[in-house]
Amino acid sequence: MTIRTASTLTLVLLTLLASHPTSAGDLRPAHGLAMHGDLKYPADFTHFDYVNPEAPKGGELRQAAMGTFDTFNPFIVKGLPAAGLGYLGQSRLYDSLMARSLDEPSSRYGLLAETVETPADRSWVAFTLRKEARWHDGRPVRVEDVIWSFNTLVEKGLPLYGLYYGNVERVEKIGERTVKFSFKPGENRELPWILGQLTVLPKHYWEKRDFGATTLEPPLGGGAYEIDSFEPGRFIKYKRRRDYWAANIPVNRGQFNFDSIRFDYYRDRDVAVEALKSDAYDIHLEYTSKKWATAYDIPAVHSGRLRKELIPDHTLKRAQGFLFNLRRPVFQDRRVRWALTHVFDFEWTNKTLFYDAYVRTRSYFQGSELAAVGLPSQAELAILEPLGDRIPPEVFTTEYQPPTTDGSGNNRKNLRTAVEMLKEAGWSVRNGKLEHTETGAPMAFEILLYDSGFERIVLPFKKNLERIGVDVTVRTIDTAQFRRRLDDYDFDVVVGNMLNSESPGNEQREFWGSEAAQRPGSRNLAGVQNSAIDEIIELIIAAPDRDALVTRCHALDRLLQWGHYQILQWHITAHPLVYWDRFGKPDTTPTQSLGINTWWFDASKAARLSPANGSSP
């Protein structure tokens, strides 16, 4: 799951033309909310700058998905949701109260909500719904739908909803079309903003059904698309609603241009790439560097019919890495985790397997001003010093850098360092096996995968671990099993893949909070339970301005870096995109996304790619 939210600072201040309410008497309805600074778009804007407002409608977009699916309810722990359903306000079937602007780091504008109000102290927020908002059955979207959706998601939905919205004290109807959320005492200045991304569901449909159960009954929606046809494990196809009530409001104009969107499922990524080259689907993000370098040397690419482009990526990078499950006793010692970090040879991996395509990741906020570098500033020390011995001492003395090698594959120096660290932690090598000095128990664990393509990366790591006596197994299972085992925390090591936002906040409770570690299905896969981290997360959520947010994120980043909860891996600085040239797209690509929703089907280009013209085998 990918979570893009916002964060904790001087939250939503904007009113109509970027004026800031300072008291209840100044309070006016606004067309949007910005976490900090001013909204880019005024109240009378007609469309976002990164769309073509006259983009034609029509055609089909075909995409690939991996694994399988068994439910159309993406909001609960149970089941494996079908591709394209989305959650947290990113669904094709449903609308959220507000829509995100993709060329601003943290602004939202009215979608279901015509206006939004919040006082200077951010103690509540009220949304007034648009009169024209409709479900696909023609019934109006009502305040009762908003209230029911909020309560149901918190009570029965994914654990993240409870953590996101835990500071809401009361939700109530205060007018025919207005819903008000009142907050518990305390600083949580992000709440008005993140409530804007609340996905609203039809109460009259769901109250007759078990929301906590998986289902393959196409649900009633109200968004730009509805489910047209499907076959579990093979495909799902969405059809554009020609009567979509919000097609031409400013936040949607120029988007949702395809008449249909189809996802075909594949069990193997190699097979999926061959299917792309055979024109079985249209667009593919190729994050395997070997395939990017070698798999597309084909006539269709040489002629430009199948386009291969590196699109600059200005977004914050994912924190991907080998993630330790601290619920396992073997990983509860920080020294053990740091020692095992020395065993991974990124430089050799990048040169030998990745064609030097990647850059080492060293921060959980890589590619952002939120990433901690150097030693703590005085402002950071004011946060960190009161935490005392609850945080690693290196936080104060040493800039974090992951271990490096010369890339030759001869990693003896780091392996010797790892053995010495493990010896200090109570482990020693006996007869070629790493054993606990007191108990004699061997160090043994499993690295769990769902993608066989990752085995070529893990197996060299396994070999190096075995050189210092660690007994490692690598197991690849199907996506449904993998999802269940993650939800139950039934794993030793997995490849964790977490995406932060430019404005972190409440979601950090879900990523690293002690409460989340104890709730099945949370995003705190590592099982981190650290009161110092909990305190810094609450400071982030309460940050009064951007400067405070940056300082507090630096502090959190340092604790995560020196906590060694993951062996951070790598990132790429561009989106490697491969697609058949049958689409039009705006001149401007949004900074926060690839903007596929803004593309359109170009019939003239498609005609040139027809089988009669030799587009595909």
Image (cartoon, grey):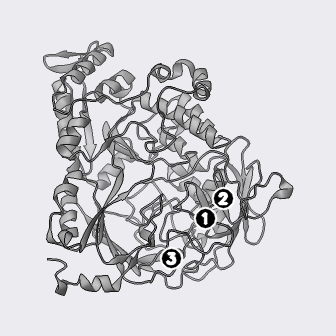
Tell me, yes or no, if residue 442 can be seen here: no
Query: Considering only vertical position in the picture, is 458 above or below 434?
Result: below
- Residue at the spot 57% in from the left edge and 79% down from the top edge: 248
Residue 397 percent location from the top left of the image: 47, 19
Q: Which residue is mark 3?
A: 254
Going from N to C along the chain, the mark reached first, 3 or 1, is 1
State the residue in front, 616 or 391.
616
Residue 452 percent location from the top left of the image: 20, 51
Q: Which residue is mark 2?
A: 33
State the residue in front, 535 or 136.
535
Q: Are marks 2 and 1 in contact (CB under 8 Å)?
A: yes
User: Of discs 2 and 1, which sits in the foreground?
Assistant: 2
Residue 515 percent location from the top left of the image: 53, 38
- Between marks 2 and 1, how big is the CA–CA gap? 9 Å
Going from N to C along the chain, the mark reached first, 2 or 1, is 2
Q: Which residue is mark 1?
A: 98
Judge from the rendering whether residue 212 lies leftward or rightward of residue 432; answer left or right.
right
Residue 489 percent location from the top left of the image: 38, 41
Kind of residue indicated by mark 2: Leu
- Between marks 3 and 1, how big is the CA–CA gap? 17 Å
